[in-house]
Image: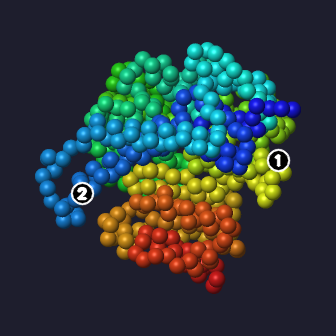
Amino acid sequence: MNYNYDLIIVGAGPGGYIAAERAGKLGLKTAIVEKGTWGGVCLNIGCIPTKTLLKNAKVFHYLDVSEKYGINYDKNSIHIDWNVAQKRKDDVVKKLTTGVQFLMKSNKVDSIVGTASAVDSHTIKVTDKEGSQKTYTAKYLIIATGSKVKMFDNPNVPVTGLSTNDLKNNQTLLTSTEILSLKEIPKSLTVIGGGVIGCEFAALFSTLGTKVTIIEYLPSILAISDRDISNELTKIFINNGIEILTNHSVASLEGNTLTYYAADDKERKNPKTITSDYFLLSTGRIPITEGFENLDLQIKPNGAFAVNNKLEALDKNNQVLDNIYIIGDVTGEKMLAHVASSQGLMAINNILVKEKKANYQERIVNYNQMPSCIYSFPEAASVGLTEEEVKKLYPDDYLSKKIPFSINGKALSDGETDGFVKLIISKKYGEILGAHILGTTATDMIAEIVNIMVNEDTIVELANACHPHPTLSEVVMDVAQDLALQINK
């Protein structure tokens, strides 16, 4: 059959555009469909704008603690021009999103603007802003439609949070999208949800002088992180003036007043209230699956499309649809930009295997080797299992070691001694089961551990690798050497 394209990709986020770039470079006739935000959530309203503003906050922080570096000045004359900070953020976003469109053009990928829906497994219908529709066919399809902010809109379940109506009718309620465009730094902010997004914005605004309160339903913030990361960052946040209220659930918002309850107050007899300039709803994201009903795709309990370990779509009968691949947040796995990009490259690889291209071997996804990062102050990064997970899986066959940065020469020189490096290994073979770093450059440092795990090296290879001095990475070596000695006794 003659198709318009070898491959159509729906969604130009970090999964979709990376896959399109690779497909174009490798000679697949490719089109990518995007309804407006080139670069997806990450480039427009996620990773990049958030990290840009976090850099502003970090510079502000250095000025605030300059005395310890012997730099004295009149702090009353220092202020942050929020308009300039916002413009810098917008300029960075514009440069990167424009770059995505240039990448598509330079790699001969056709960019189609509009909202896509599936007619069948080889045909996509695209509707533009004026309502005009066109159809396109392809041998292969990659769905990379991403995710949206989770709201509590189901009228058939008990009230468990704030809804789209609250967001529409109350200007004090924000999601991670609206908070990026605030016209001024708020005096007070209540963050609803102590996950990654909530903690990053808590760190950002508390550093800029905002009174920040985090309300979390679970017993701790960053509940899915390794407990040492959660506990240490909690202490740091509290020392920095952030109030943390765990084991509480949100009920309603009226004006500038939020009503919430203790999690064990099931009958909601003892309401509590807090007043803030703004409230950030950061209770997670949900996959965007609309538009593909004709494909009979299987939807998992978390609302995501089901795939196998090759990222091929599964139908409602659990059968493989071998010309359809699904990547990114819409898989419901780790909702991270680098995970989506990795999935996109894997999907292209597996398509080339089907096309019998030389030198390509089938790849399967391994989320255990994909890192997670938190851009708080200090940063946190992890890969593999938490110690709590390891205890359940390998109760008698693991070793764990943690060394703080407070003994490291570079950390002392920098005046950045918060945090630690923690490694968890198999006692028998020395393989790395998990790594957790809390420190000023943790998100860069974790890549070394990822490489060790992907290459199936052990703690011995990591311990034998010469690390430059003085660097924070020496702590990784110190932990590795300690563990290597234990398994070589």
Tell me which residue sits at (61%, 70%) in the image. 399
Residue 94 in the image: state x and y as whole percent: 44, 38
Q: Quadrant of residue 186?
A: top left
**Residue on which the image places disc 2:** 65
Secondary structure under tag 1 reads loop
In the image, what residue occupies the spot 36% across and 65% down? Answer: 417
- Mark 1 — residue? 355
Query: Could you say which is closer to the camera, residue 77 or residue 191?
Result: 77
The amino acid pointed to by label 2 is Val
Q: CA distance from mark 2 to mark 1?
A: 59 Å
Q: Quadrant of residue 178?
A: top left
**Quarter of the image with the N terminus in it:** top right
Q: Residues within 10 Å of mark 1 (few under 14, many from 20)?
A: few
Q: Is residue 195 visible?
A: no
> Which residue is found at the position 60% from the left and 31% from the top?
34
Closer to the N terminus: mark 2 or mark 1?
2
Residue 26 appears in the figure = yes
